[in-house]
């Protein structure tokens, strides 16, 4: 018999200066509680309302529970029996995370043969018929008789999930869309890359080697991007003009399966391929967003710039302030999304259009990141807004090209969403051609991206990821800044995924986080 526990972060010392003055509607709609499933052999001995629960045995997200403890709000012994204090239309699985006394990122925890673990997983949704996994257990697949009411958890046991109906196929059966596989008998670059010990630098080198192979052996195929997923498979994105002749192309790279798709299949935003990589239309208005003009700038504050629309009328484009970085001589700059800055390169806070906070000083080529030199009168703190009552994330550094990479939970805090947690489910290298002045030769740039999954959406549950989120800082449980949000895919088979430029690109350009 399992025990279900609803928990929340304990109240911390309240720091008013770091709390948003306006809570975005998207954040208001997200559950702030977590479901914990325990068993008689793996669970706390004493459970009572308002008592303390130690999170470590359940592998909870560190950013949400930095002290390692939580407050028990409710508990009961039958998963699908309504709790004593239950709001209308609220179910147990309407929590962002489901914690269990197993770390499912460890392959030793077998979800098929471990009876206790298997029972826990089957108890989350009513009518669960099967719980399975893809290769290398990048995520969990729940197959149910009928889709339960949304919203559904982002993670279970530390892994992202998909939910689908066994017979009709409704829902999302697989995390990644199907693509054209290559020929398995053609295996290239069989040594030198290990998907279990991956870094930005290692993936960049592999992308160079793959691109060189195609240039020498398949010159008609123009590679745009190489993506490695949490299920240890590759996708190669090719130019739309190339015919998919995958029977003649490699089916394995570094001993991992590879499939191919056209660039158009990703449905990236239109501005991505523009020469100046700038927006040309203002962002549509959302519901409630935090457009407060703060006396101290910090990551997550709404910033604005002026653009000229097709009718030559000025319009305002909003984005999100990044972090303060410095170069080797100590000069400091605020990171921002280059495509959201107008031709004047002037930036201000949304409610203070007459007050310039800074101007673009540097663009990091092909990354979509620019560095804004702030006015001397502007104060900037490298601490974002609190993510729960009194809990303020502590950023430690920018991710580097040598960091060992893991597919794990990450966070962002934008004026349109407030706190939004996600899971990094893929990493890619986009190949960009840079033509140097006075030369017809092209120099290739290999730009690293992280791909985020925000949770499965069905029916009337719609993503609330406006373009104004661009520039938002993405950080992990250790406080390391992984990257900067760039765009989300809003239609097609890749809908629901988002891309962020890796912070290692900023480090490679000679910048570090201001302490």
Image: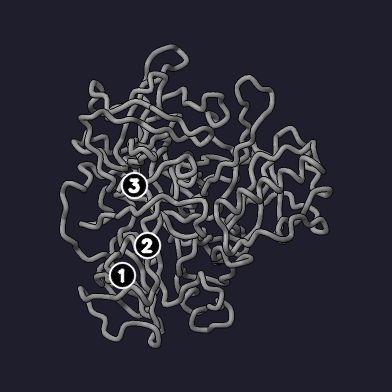
For the N terminus, which image quadrant? bottom left
- Mark 1–mark 3 contact, CB under 8 Å? no
- Mark 3–mark 2 contact, CB under 8 Å? no
Residue 452 seen in this snapshot: yes
Compare marks 3 and 2 and give the one earlier in the sequence: 2
Q: Position of residue 437 (x, y in %)?
A: 60, 21
Q: CA distance from mark 1 to mark 3?
A: 24 Å
Q: Which mark is residue 50?
A: none
Q: CA distance from mark 3 to mark 2?
A: 19 Å
| Disc number lying in front (3 or 2) | 3
Does residue 326 appear left or right of residue 505 in this picture?
Answer: left
Where is residue 299, by image quadrant?
A: top left
Which residue is at a point 34% across and 23% down the rendered structure image? 346
Residue under circle 1? 6
Residue under circle 3? 413
Compare marks 1 and 3 and give the one earlier in the sequence: 1
Q: Position of residue 274 (x, y in %)?
A: 56, 26
Mark 1: secondary structure: strand
Residue under circle 2? 95
Does residue 455 appear left or right of residue 32 in this picture?
Answer: right
Which residue is at a point 65% across and 59% down the rendered structure image? 193
Q: Position of residue 322 (x, y in %)?
A: 36, 40
- Mark 1–mark 2 contact, CB under 8 Å? yes
Which residue is at a point 34% across and 25% down the rendered structure image? 359
């Amino acid at each position: 018999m399992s025990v279900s526990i609803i928990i929340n972060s304990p109240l911390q010392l309240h720091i008013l200066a770091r709390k948003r003055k306006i809570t975005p509607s998207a954040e208001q709609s997200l559950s702030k509680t977590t479901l914990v499933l325990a068993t008689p052999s793996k669970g706390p001995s004493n459970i009572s309302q308002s008592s303390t629960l130690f999170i470590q045995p359940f592998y909870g997200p560190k950013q949400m529970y930095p002290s390692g403890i939580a407050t028990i709000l409710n508990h009961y012994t039958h998963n699908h029996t309504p709790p004593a204090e239950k709001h209308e239309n609220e179910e147990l699985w309407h929590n962002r995370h489901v914690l269990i006394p197993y770390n499912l990122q460890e392959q030793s925890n077998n979800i098929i043969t471990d009876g206790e673990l298997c029972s826990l997983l089957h108890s989350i949704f009513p009518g669960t018929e099967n719980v399975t996994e893809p290769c290398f257990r990048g995520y969990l697949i729940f197959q149910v008789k009928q889709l339960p009411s949304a919203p559904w958890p982002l993670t279970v046991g530390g892994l992202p999930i998909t939910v689908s109906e066994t017979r009709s196929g409704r829902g999302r059966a697989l995390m990644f869309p199907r693509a054209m596989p290559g020929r398995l008998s053609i295996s290239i670059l069989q040594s030198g890359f290990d998907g279990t010990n991956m870094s930005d630098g290692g993936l960049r080198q592999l992308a160079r080697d793959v691109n060189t192979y195609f240039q020498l052996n398949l010159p008609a195929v123009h590679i745009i991007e190489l993506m490695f997923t949490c299920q240890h498979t590759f996708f190669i994105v090719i130019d739309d003009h190339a015919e998919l002749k995958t029977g003649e192309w490699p089916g394995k790279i570094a001993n991992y399966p590879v499939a191919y798709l056209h660039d158009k299949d990703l449905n990236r935003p239109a501005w991505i391929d523009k020469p100046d990589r700038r927006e040309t239309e203002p962002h549509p208005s959302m519901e409630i967003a935090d457009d407060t003009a703060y006396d101290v700038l910090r990551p997550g504050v709404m910033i604005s710039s002026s653009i000229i629309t097709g009718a030559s009328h000025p319009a305002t484009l909003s984005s999100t302030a990044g972090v303060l970085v410095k170069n080797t001589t100590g000069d400091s700059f605020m990171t921002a999304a280059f495509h959201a800055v107008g031709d004047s390169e002037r930036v201000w806070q949304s409610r203070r259009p007459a007050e310039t906070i800074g101007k673009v000083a540097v663009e990091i080529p092909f990354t979509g990141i620019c560095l804004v030199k702030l006015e001397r009168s502007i104060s900037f703190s490298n601490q974002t807004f609190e993510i729960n009552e009194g809990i303020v994330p502590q950023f430690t550094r920018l991710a580097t090209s040598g960091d060992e990479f893991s597919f794990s939970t990450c966070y962002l805090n934008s004026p349109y969403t407030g706190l939004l947690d996600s899971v990094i489910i893929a990493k890619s290298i986009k190949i960009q051609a840079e033509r140097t002045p006075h030369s017809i030769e092209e120099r290739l740039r290999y730009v690293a991206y992280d791909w985020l999954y925000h949770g499965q959406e069905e029916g009337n549950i719609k993503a609330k990821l406006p373009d104004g989120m661009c520039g938002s800082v993405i950080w992990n449980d250790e406080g390391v800044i992984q990257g900067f949000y760039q765009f989300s895919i809003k239609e097609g088979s890749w809908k629901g995924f988002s891309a962020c430029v890796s912070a290692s690109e900023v480090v490679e350009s000679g910048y570090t986080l201001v302490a």
